[in-house]
Structures are given as C-alpha cells and as structure tokens.
Image: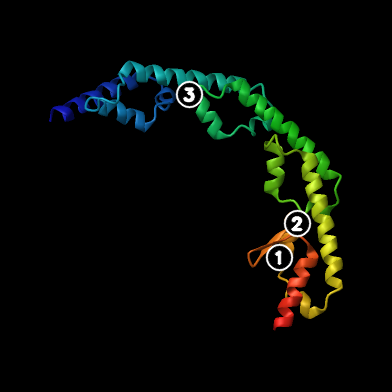
Amino acid sequence: FEEATQRDERAKSLEMRFKGLAKTVRSRITKKEVKDFIDSCSNIDIDIDIDTLTELALKRESRAKRLEMRFKLLSKGVKSRISKNRIKAFIMTGYPSIATMAEEALESERRESEVKEKLATLSGNVRNHLTQQEIDEAIVNNSFDSSELVKMAVSREDRAIHVKNKLFTLTETIRCRIRKQTLDMFIRYGAVVSQGELITSLDSICSLAQRQHSMI
C-alpha cells in the first residue's frame, strides 16, 4: 500500500510538472522513462528525480530546435539522406552530432551522383545485371565504390554472353538438364554450388548436365 501511494504521488507530481511544459517538450520524454520515474520509489536500481526528467525533456527539445534550424540550411536532397533513426538518436542523446550527420549526407549525395554518372556510361543490358541493393550499397558503403560496381556489371555481361554462346553448342536435351537458376547464379557470381561441389567454370556445368543425361 505504501509503494502504491508513493507511485500515485510521483505520478501526480509529474503530471503537475508537465502541465507547466509545452506539449512538444513533454513529448520528448518516453513512456518508459515516465514509468521508471514512477517505479523508482520501489526500485533501488532506478534513480530518477523530477528535476532530472524535466531537464532531460528541455535538453531534447533544445536539440530538436537546433536541428530544425540547421536543416533549413541544407538542400532537400541532403536532408532526405538523414534517416529518422539518426535524427531521433541525436534528439535523445546528442549523438551523432548535427555536423556529422550533415557531412555523411553530403558524402552520400556525392557518391550517388558519381554512381549515376558511371552507370550512365553502360548499356541497358549491362546495367540490368545490377540489383538496386547493390547500387544502394555502392552509395552508402565507403569500401565499395562506383568503379567496382561497373566492373561487376561488365563481368556479369561477359559471363552472360559466354553462357549464351555455349548453350548454342549443346543439344536441346542437354540444355534442358541445366537449370536456369544455376546459370543465373553463375552469371552473377562466377561460381555455383551443385551437389555440394563448388563449380567455377561453365564447361564443368555443361559436363555435369551431360553426365546426368547419360545416366538417365
């Protein structure tokens, strides 16, 4: 009963304090933080007082205002590259900094422009060998640039042409033994696993199909 009374008193004191704050400031405190404050009377592991909670809300609101002002100086394209999770993390904790987020967004925009320029030099058939996920990875991942993306696409097109030419030399019955999924995997990665064996050449794939046909 005593703990319940203390919780009720804490809840009422928090409600009174929150009445003196703007709605946007109040919204900066999470439900869990409110619950922890109310429960702290009976949990020695939680040490939160109402002044600390109020100060936390005001600091977060201040960060949100600063972020809003800084965003006005950024282009729409750059702002769109800063994820909601990053924005929320800054408001709640102060990290990463606004400058860091802006620099990352500008770098992302530069990389996307670079990737688009490189892809524009490729034919449609070659570009089609790249997935959107791979293109996005080249934009956001510093260890994987646009030149590597182009090399990947060209290598896949070379393998696709090699596959097409090789299939013309096979009989219809042998071609039917080679699954499309196997060829797609070979074109994409230059290797495929079949019956627990890593196959890295098209000739080996064809030989396996011929052996299977002979067995049948």
- Is 176 left or right of 4, judged from the image as shown? right
Q: Secondary structure at mark 2?
A: loop
Position in image of residue 167 (x %, y %): 83, 70
Between 8 and 22, the one lying in front of the other is 8
Query: Mark on residue 93?
Result: 3
Between 128 and 141, the one lying in front of the other is 141
Residue sitting at x 70%, y 36%: 143
Between 23 and 100, the one lying in front of the other is 100
Query: Mark on residue 190?
Result: 2
Residue type highlighted by circle 3: Thr
Nearer to us: label 3 or label 2: 2
Q: Secondary structure at mark 1?
A: helix
Position in image of residue 106 (x %, y %): 70, 28
- Residue picked out by circle 1: 182
Residue sitting at x 64%, y 30%: 79
Residue sitting at x 46%, y 21%: 60
Query: Furthest residue to the left?
Result: 1
